[in-house]
């Protein structure tokens, strides 16, 4: 492990020198500010940043119809070390993985502010255990975007299959841009008063594989939501959101849950703050049948504060997160926070050892823009479970003798470097480490010699290449 860590540091130093040389060379020829096109959940930031930027590209038009081709391409080779254990997956002993995502499509602009957007996607994973990349191509997005529906240009309507999007801090809803993404059949209505209030109503059709115990293959939950952002001043802003999910499978039950979400955020000078609370309340029913079995009563909260330098070159922020757990795994009540589509990377780092349910974590993050085209940073996290046994997608889902009273998941850290070659091409080099705590080690079991399967400091090294037009 020491040799791996040393090699990683040397690789970073070599890469830094090359990037600085490239930065000096390019700064003499352009004053253009670099824009990140890295996936929003592939960047640790104080708050999620839009990664949907598309640079101006050539268009084909006949004065009535405009055609703009688009492409979004990610390639990520990565290595894992010391029995790397990702949450919800078996231990990775292969040590080498490749991820490739390509979205290719276009936007067709028609008269009267009507756009047709479509994107086909190919996504594949290669590992020593999974085999070759998946060559399948699917329709990731295909929707109609109607803008300026009123005289003040405040109303818009979208319908079709579309990316779920990025909402707030992605504590509940994010689009998993780092991976395959998330797209569903949906209808959205938006009313937007610039710099004052933005409100979006949405209906989303979901689908889940049904358990083996029933005679049908798919379940069809419905996600309804109203997302609102109110901008009062630089120092006072707030989100008021009301998601409602119907008939989602969770922890062996069919659940219907209301999820009110309130967040206050803003900044005073160079100091930024954010405080968010989400309540989940509803009912549990059997997978087949309508009788009520129990209640859903869960919650999550996050508070954070950061300092950003006047010139924007460096920032430091700290955050505390808590997602409730379930202290009784034998009843029909659910008290574990449903993370749904949470962006865990910006909270817990890239190691992916645990999720945001039945956990409390404290993080510290430092980011430094070395030059106009290069940024680097450090991120650290320390995490514990709240309950030793839990129904959620946490670590221990069934009662067992852990042999320890510890609640320590562990301590982790990331060091990363982003190189914004231009508006269309970005690179990211990242190395993550995670030292398992006693609880994490106990839950992941022992081999035939009673030696822990996960005990050593795990590592993950990857290079992400992103191209977008």
Image (tube, grey):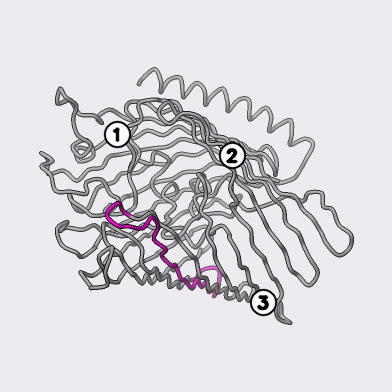
Secondary structure type for disc 2: strand
CB under 8 Å between callouts 1 and 2? no
Q: Is residue 20 left or right of residue 221?
A: right
Q: Is residue 448 left or right of residue 155?
A: left
Q: Nearer the viewer, residue 300 or 101?
A: 101
Q: Residue at x 45, y 61 (%)?
A: 206
Give how far across and how far down residue 439 sits, in percent: 20, 41
The answer to whether 392 is drawn above or below residue 12 in the figure is below
Query: Which residue does the numbered mark 1 point to in the structure image?
Result: 435
Q: Residue at x 74, y 68 (%)?
A: 114
Q: Nearer the viewer, mark 1 or mark 2?
A: 2
Q: Residue at x 59, y 55 (%)?
A: 50
Give how far across and how far down residue 411 sits, in percent: 30, 39
Query: Which residue does the numbered mark 3 point to in the structure image?
Result: 154
**Label 1 – label 2 distance at C-alpha:** 29 Å
Q: Residue furthest bottom?
A: 151
Closer to the N terminus: mark 1 or mark 2?
A: 2
Quarter of the image where one finds residue 276? bottom left
Quarter of the image where one finds residue 151? bottom right
Q: Residues within 10 Å of mark 1 (few under 14, many from 20)?
A: some
Q: Residue at x 48, y 59 (%)?
A: 272
Q: Residues within 10 Å of mark 2 (few under 14, many from 20)?
A: many
Query: Which residue does the numbered mark 2 point to in the structure image?
Result: 74
Give how far across and how far down residue 93 sits, in percent: 35, 26
Q: Residues within 10 Å of mark 3 (few under 14, many from 20)?
A: some
Q: Is residue 207 left or right of residue 156?
A: left
Q: Is residue 424 left or right of residue 229?
A: right
Q: Residue furthest front?
A: 215
Q: Is residue 371 visible?
A: no
Closer to the N terminus: mark 3 or mark 1?
A: 3
Q: Which residues are magenta?
A: 211-238
């Amino acid at each position: 492990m020491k040799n791996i860590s040393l090699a990683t540091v040397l690789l970073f130093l070599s890469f830094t020198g090359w990037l600085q040389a490239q930065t000096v060379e390019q700064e003499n020829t352009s004053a253009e500010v670099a824009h990140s096109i890295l996936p929003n959940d592939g960047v640790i930031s104080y708050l999620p940043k839009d990664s949907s930027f598309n640079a101006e590209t050539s268009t084909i038009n006949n004065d009535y119809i405009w055609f703009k081709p688009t492409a979004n391409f990610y390639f990520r080779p990565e290595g894992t070390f010391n029995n790397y254990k990702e949450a919800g997956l078996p231990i990775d002993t292969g040590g080498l993985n490749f991820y490739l995502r390509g979205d290719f499509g276009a936007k067709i602009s028609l008269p009267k502010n009507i756009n047709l957007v479509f994107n086909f996607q190919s996504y594949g994973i290669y590992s020593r255990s999974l085999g070759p990349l998946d060559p399948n191509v699917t329709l990731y997005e295909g929707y109609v975007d109607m803008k300026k529906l009123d005289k003040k240009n405040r109303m818009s309507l979208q319908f079709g299959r579309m990316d779920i999007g990025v909402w707030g801090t992605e504590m509940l809803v994010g689009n998993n841009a780092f991976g395959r993404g998330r797209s569903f059949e949906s209808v959205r209505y938006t009313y937007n008063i610039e710099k004052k209030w933005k409100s979006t109503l949405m209906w989303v059709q979901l689908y889940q594989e049904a358990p083996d115990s029933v005679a049908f293959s798919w379940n069809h939950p419905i996600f309804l939501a109203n997302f609102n952002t109110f901008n009062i001043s630089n120092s006072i802003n707030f989100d008021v959101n009301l998601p409602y999910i119907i008939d989602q499978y969770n922890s062996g039950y069919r659940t219907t849950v209301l999820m009110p979400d309130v967040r206050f955020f803003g900044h005073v000078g160079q100091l930024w703050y954010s405080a968010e609370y989400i309540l989940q309340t509803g009912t549990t029913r059997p997978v087949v049948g309508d009788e009520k079995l129990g209640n859903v009563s869960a919650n999550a909260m996050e508070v954070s504060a950061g300092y950003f330098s006047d010139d924007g070159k460096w920032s430091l922020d700290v955050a505390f997160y808590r997602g409730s757990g379930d202290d009784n795994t034998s009843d029909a009540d659910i008290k574990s926070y449903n993370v749904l589509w949470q962006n865990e990377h910006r909270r817990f780092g890239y190691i992916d050892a645990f999720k945001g349910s039945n956990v409390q974590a404290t993080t510290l993050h430092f980011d430094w823009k070395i030059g106009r085209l290069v940024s680097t940073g450090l991120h650290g996290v320390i995490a514990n479970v709240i309950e030793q046994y839990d129904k959620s997608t946490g670590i221990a889902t069934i009662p067992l003798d852990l042999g320890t009273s510890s609640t320590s998941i562990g301590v982790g850290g990331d060091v990363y470097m982003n190189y914004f070659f231009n508006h269309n091409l970005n690179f990211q080099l990242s190395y993550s480490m995670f030292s398992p705590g006693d609880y994490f080690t106990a839950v992941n079991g022992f081999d035939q010699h009673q030696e822990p399967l996960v005990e050593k400091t795990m590592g993950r090294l990857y290079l992400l290449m992103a191209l977008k037009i």
